[in-house]
Amino acid sequence: MARPKSPLLSRERIVAAALALVDVHGLAALSTRRLATRLGVSGPSLYNHFATKDDLLEAAADAVIARVDITPLGARPWPEALRAWATSYRRALAEHPNLVPVATQGPGRRPHALRMADAVYGALVEAGWPPREATRIGALMRYFVVGAASGSFAGGFVDDPALYGAHYPHLTDAHRLQAHRREVDEGAFETGLDALVAGLELRFARLRER
Amino acid sequence: MARPKSPLLSRERIVAAALALVDVHGLAALSTRRLATRLGVSGPSLYNHFATKDDLLEAAADAVIARVDITPLGARPWPEALRAWATSYRRALAEHPNLVPVATQGPGRRPHALRMADAVYGALVEAGWPPREATRIGALMRYFVVGAASGSFAGGFVDDPALYGAHYPHLTDAHRLQAHRREVDEGAFETGLDALVAGLELRFARLRER
DNA sequence: GTCTATAAAGTGATAGAC
DNA sequence: GTCTATCACTTTATAGAC
């Protein structure tokens, strides 16, 4: 096969396959050859669609961010909007936890990431937050969401009672975390998001008073 | 040189060199050969001290956690203790941001990480938080700290006014973030930590009322 | 406990045919 | 826009000498 009538590949197909591969086997397992094999083509074909592997990774990260729902921002009261956006943001990242280190590096030149940053900052400023504060809130929300998506807390504990008993007196039940992994992780995110937004509302009220 | 009189290497020396290498050149640049060269030995020598490269990485991650100050936990009122611990935790991680993805994977079987988890959980339970809540708080604090340490927020924006002006109406000054990077990142962490702890104090008060 | 030598494989990317 | 062939290099880890 030299040049097929209709293209076998597209940026979209490549990105989708890359995400699937990274999800299952991790970021380190993403090689151009492996990805190409998955797509039924040979390695170098990918270079007709992306200049470098890094290019491809950037596109994949932006595709993840594209799925975040930013419609509440600016359309609802800021505490509610922040909560809804953060929840959607976390869900989008948590679907591809192995890609979080890439998405973590900031928006760079990725259009969807920039659009999201613009919406968050814009909504906060329009709600009455001083620009300086709005920047901070955008940053601290990202911190929390990225941290929550970048790895299970409960899953970090080994399911082996013998490990904890002797040396760590308060962790006697830590081996049971694995079993309730999802509940613990999502509960912690919700509790943290509530606390964070409640704390920010306090701060906002104090700011208005003056 | 066959077997030197006194060992050239030690786990400590290897870990220190690995951290230095990862700090400057990133996690991907850590190869056994490169590390060995830095230490003035040949590649395979490292395997006398660590069974695998992964072993070495785990030891490095635990060495970072060992530097977190956990003494406030249990010694001071929980909101103050939480704040002090989180600040120290972030500082320790932020000194080695490239290693954060490794440290993020939970304590596993690393002694210092387990000791830290034990201290946090223990302090919260003894302060009167129900076990379930204490677990969540440990998790959500880690989310925030890890997120804050895993990459600069401000540094994720390109220093190029032309990029933002046209398409992102609220980001017209985003190119200036790079210049105030440190201030923005640390300010956001402090503001977030304040909000988080304030929100948790509210929650604690409501819990006590019942 | 360090060395040399080497296994066995995988890496990103390019050139040029079709 | 895909192919084959290939470059130039890197990787982790083992075997056995000293």
Image (spheres, coloured by chain):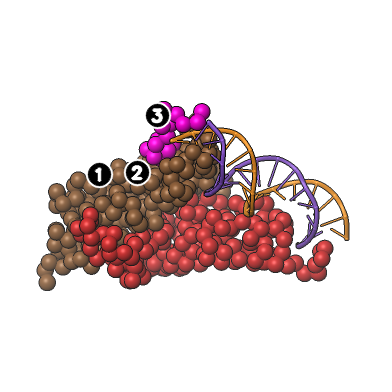
Chain colours: A brown, B red, C purple, D orange
* Other residues around mark 1 within 10 Å, as few (<14) / some (14–19) / many (≥20): some
* Other residues around mark 2 within 10 Å, as few (<14) / some (14–19) / many (≥20): many
Q: Marks 3 and 2: in contact by CB < 8 Å? A: no
Q: Does B106 lie within the magenta span? A: no
Whether residue B68 is situated above or below residue A59 in the rendered picture: below
Given residues A196 and A168, the one toward you in this image is A196
Q: Does A9 lie within the magenta span? A: yes
Given residues A61 and A104, the one toward you in this image is A61
- Whole-percent x and y of residue B181? 35, 69
CA gap between label 2 and label 3 equals: 24 Å
- Which quarter of the picture shows residue A205? bottom left
Q: Marks 3 and 1: in contact by CB < 8 Å? A: no
Which mark is drawn over residue A210?
none
Residue at image coords 27%, 62%? B162
Residue at image coords 70%, 67%? B40
> Is disc 3 placed on a helix, strand or loop?
loop
- Whole-percent x and y of residue A97? 42, 45
Q: Which amino acid does label 3 sit on?
A: Ser
Tell me the chain of label 3.
Answer: A
Residue at image coords 14%, 49%? A76
Q: Badge 1 is on which residue? A: A69
Q: Badge 2 is on which residue? A: A63
